[in-house]
Image (cartoon, rainbow, N blue to C red):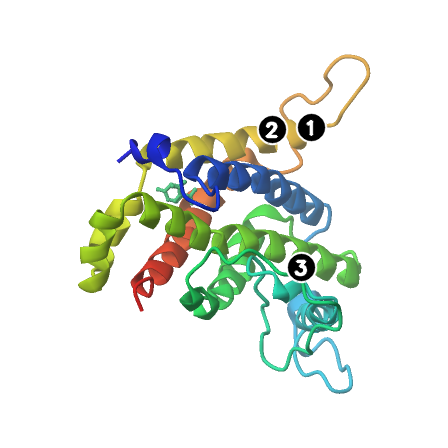
Amino acid sequence: HEMAKAESNVSDGLTLDLVRDSLIRQEDTIVFSLIERAKFPLNSPTYDPSYTSIPGSCGSLVEFIVKETEAIQAKAGRYENPEEHPFFPDNLPPSLVPHHKYPKVLHPAAMFVNINKMIWDMYFNKLLPLFVTPGDDGNYASTAARDLECLQALSRRIHYGKLVAEVKFRDERKDYEPAIRAQDRDTLIGLLTFANVEEAVKKRVAKKAVTFGRDVQLGDDGNKGKYKLDPAIVSRLYGDWVIPLTKEVEVEYLLHRLD
Ligand SMILES: O=C(O)C(=O)C[C@]1(C(=O)O)C=C[C@@H](O)C=C1
């Protein structure tokens, strides 16, 4: 089904190539946010609920930062954008800014797909210990702020799977419809998987880690193979978690595409 690329010509101008261009640009944001987080050691008190005793808040410092930041950003209209998904959607304050008419591209069922709990779990339990050094330098607030940027960048990329799925559905409706009617996950995964694209993504993000993770010097390249973030880990992050979670969003969206 590589043919779909050339043929897609939908009314709102959305094409698989355009959606993929956005995914590629978002790689820059993700790799750079990880580099920024890697400046700090693990700083485990950031994640320890017993470290803080903030009145009115019972979780860890990172939960406090994420919840409070999301509340401010919600008031500023961030979650009006269908591409943004909060980590703590309960009790978010309403937007206080004028309503912006985002183009209605997705099926309304898209609203109910939010896998940020899985992303949170993956980031803190699997990924973080892989790419930060052990240790504690006391910079917990800055550490939590960097975590939030990583989480938001990952969440945006993974939930972009809704748009990817929508374009694929429009391009190959007759293949997708029977699988959706049968609620057949495996067939849907088969239809939306492009192994060659996944391989290219994994190689490219490793190359971005090499490129962005160097010290820029005016004279000779003094890097001697030392990077701020291990390129192999970025490749693994994508292969083991980012791509599978994006596919999970694609399937969840498609299962309700005909509701
Ligand atoms: O580019 C696509 O077709 C996507 O669905 C995105 C993505 C990815 O997460 O990078 C996921 C599944 C495909 O197998 C290839 C790549």
Are there few (<14), some (14-19), or many (20+) residues within 10 Å of tag 3?
many
Residue 42: % across, % down = 66, 56
Q: Amino acid at mark 1?
A: Arg
Report how far apart the C-alphas of labels 1 and 3 lie in the structure: 24 Å
Count of marks overlaid on the render: 3
First-in-chain label (3 vs 2):
3
Q: Amino acid at mark 2?
A: Val
Q: Amino acid at mark 3?
A: Leu
First-in-chain label (1 vs 3):
3
Q: Quadrant of ligand 1?
A: top left
Asked if disc 3 and disc 2 are in contact, CB closer than 8 Å, the reply is: no
Q: Nearer the viewer, mark 3 or mark 2?
A: 3
Which residue is label 2 attached to?
A: 210
* Residue ID at (63%, 82%): 91
Left or right: 130 as drawn, with respect to 36: left
Asked if disc 1 and disc 3 are in contact, CB closer than 8 Å, the reply is: no
* Residue ID at (41%, 43%): 10
View extreme (top): residue: 220
* Residue ID at (75%, 73%): 96
Q: Secondary structure at mark 1?
A: loop
Q: Give the quarter of the figure containing the C terminus.
A: bottom left
Q: Give the quarter of the figure containing the N terminus.
A: top left
Q: Secondary structure at mark 3?
A: helix
Numbered circle sitting on residue 148:
3
Quarter-of-image position of residue 207: top right
Front residue of 110 and 126: 110
Asked if disc 2 and disc 1 are in contact, CB closer than 8 Å, the reply is: yes
Residue 158: % across, % down = 49, 53
Residue 86: % across, % down = 59, 67
Which residue is label 1 attached to?
A: 214
